[in-house]
């Protein structure tokens, strides 16, 4: 009988301000991950500056790759395939990772696996336990807010999404209005734990669709903050954080509840940077317990951008024969596939 060989996938992620390389065995077992974050560099500018981000990826990528192999005590020859985030993201940043991946694939004659960044976030969950289908994935990040239905591996059907801002983008902008440093999401989330829901804010897009809208909520917070300032009142940051978090999470859970019930779903996963929010994690726990649905949320370290999730997704893409040749290009925008 033929013994199934273990598959070691090396993943590379550079779509925004994290340069990361990881080796994952059989799509589930993380061997080693290295992440070089540029948060400290960009926070002085209040957000990611694309040109600066690309330059730092160039500076970091070789070091991060070498460190990852060293930590894993592996040689690149022992790797079975290279998985790379081809998009979406900042084009200059994406290109640095892509060129590194293509160079490795060419020199060492390894298959090249293109991975959509959001597929990576979804598959971060398989580093914890195997995905069970059919499932709903709630994708909440700096660029995405979507409800995706999956009936099998690499089959994504979008049930709904944001009509304007992404939830993470909204967290970051609200944080900026009240004077918190980039990235503001985690700071709002932390402040909310000590605040009270005292500010009245509108719950966004109460309709029959599975869609979201966060720009109105963002404007409401900006107006409220300006009005208080004009009246000479100081904003109670922790209370505003709590009030904002309450309505934004309510907007998400009410649409997700509808999608779970109407599509008779038993498995829900959460994906993307905002999955690190303790407020959202608690709300998801409550919702899925109430509806008797199984919930999977990645541990904090797999929520924000990392290459382990790209290597994990790469494993399932590889099994599905989704390979690219050396003509693969980066895409700043692309539908999830
Ligand atoms: O997935 P991610 O690392 O990058 C994108 O692909 O966009 O997500 C980044 C987003 C940022 O908007 C950040 O503020 C938000 O995730 N975020 C959080 C938390 N940690 C990160 N938002 C709320 N609470 C958190 N704890
Ligand atoms: Zn991301």
Image: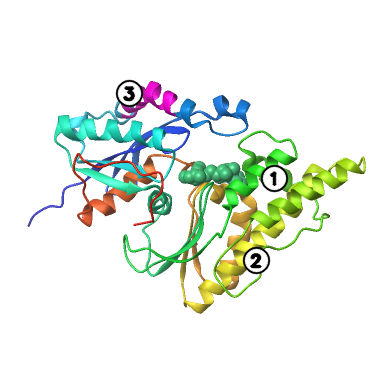
Q: Which mark identifies residue 174?
A: 1
| Scheme of colours in the image | rainbow
316 lies left or right of 216: left
70 lies left or right of 263: left
Is 17 or 298 nearer to us in this picture? 17
Task: Give x and y (percent) for residue 143.
Answer: 51, 48
- Name the residue tied to disc 3: 62
> Is the residue 130 above or below the residue 312 in the image?
below
Q: Residue at x 48, y 50 (%)?
A: 298
> Is the residue 74 above or below the residue 205 in the image?
above
Give the extent of the magenta segment: 54-68
Question: Is the CB of the residue bearing disc 1 within 8 angstroms of ligand 1?
Answer: no
Task: Give x and y (percent) for residue 85.
Answer: 35, 42
Q: Earlier in the sequence, mark 2 or mark 3?
A: 3
> Quick check: marks 1 and 2 in contact, CB under 8 Å?
no
Q: Residue at x 25, y 45 (%)?
A: 113
Say what secondary structure mark 3 lies in.
Answer: helix
Say what secondary structure mark 2 lies in.
Answer: loop
Which SS type dominates the magenta stretch? helix
> Is the residue 114 above or below the residue 102 in the image?
below
- Name the residue tied to disc 2: 205
Cα separation between marks 1 and 2: 18 Å
Task: Give x and y (percent) for residue 52.
Answer: 48, 25
């Amino acid at each position: 009988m033929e013994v199934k060989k273990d598959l070691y996938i090396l993943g590379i992620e550079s779509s925004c301000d994290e340069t990361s390389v990881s080796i994952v065995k059989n799509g589930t077992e993380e061997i080693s991950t290295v992440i070089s974050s540029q948060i400290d560099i960009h926070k002085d500018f209040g957000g990611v500056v694309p040109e600066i981000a690309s330059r730092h990826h160039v500076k970091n990528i070789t070091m991060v790759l070498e460190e990852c192999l060293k930590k894993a005590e592996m040689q690149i020859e022992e790797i079975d395939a290279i998985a790379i985030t081809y998009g979406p993201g900042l084009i200059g940043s994406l290109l640095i990772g892509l060129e590194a991946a293509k160079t490795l694939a060419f020199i060492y004659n390894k298959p090249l696996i293109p991975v959509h960044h959001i597929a990576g976030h979804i598959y971060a969950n398989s580093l914890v336990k195997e995905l069970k289908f059919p499932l709903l994935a709630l994708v909440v990040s700096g660029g995405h807010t979507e409800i995706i239905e999956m009936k099998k591996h690499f089959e994504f059907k979008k049930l709904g999404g944001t009509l304007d801002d992404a939830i993470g983008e909204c967290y970051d902008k609200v944080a900026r209005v009240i004077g918190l440093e980039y990235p503001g999401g985690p700071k709002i989330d932390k402040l909310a734990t000590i605040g009270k829901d005292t500010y009245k804010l509108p719950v966004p897009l109460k309709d029959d669709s599975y869609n979201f809208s966060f720009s109105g909520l963002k404007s409401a917070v900006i107006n409220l903050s300006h009005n208080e300032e004009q009246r000479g009142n100081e904003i109670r940051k922790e209370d505003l954080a709590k009030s904002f978090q309450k309505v934004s999470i309510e907007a998400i859970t009410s649409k997700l509840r509808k999608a779970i019930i109407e599509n008779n779903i038993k498995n829900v996963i959460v994906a993307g940077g905002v999955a690190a929010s303790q407020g959202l994690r608690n709300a998801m726990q409550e919702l899925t317990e109430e509806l008797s649905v199984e919930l999977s949320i990645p541990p904090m370290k797999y929520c924000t951008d990392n290459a382990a999730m790209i290597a994990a997704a790469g494993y399932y893409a590889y099994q599905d024969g989704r390979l690219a040749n050396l003509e693969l290009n980066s895409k700043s925008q692309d539908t999830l596939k």
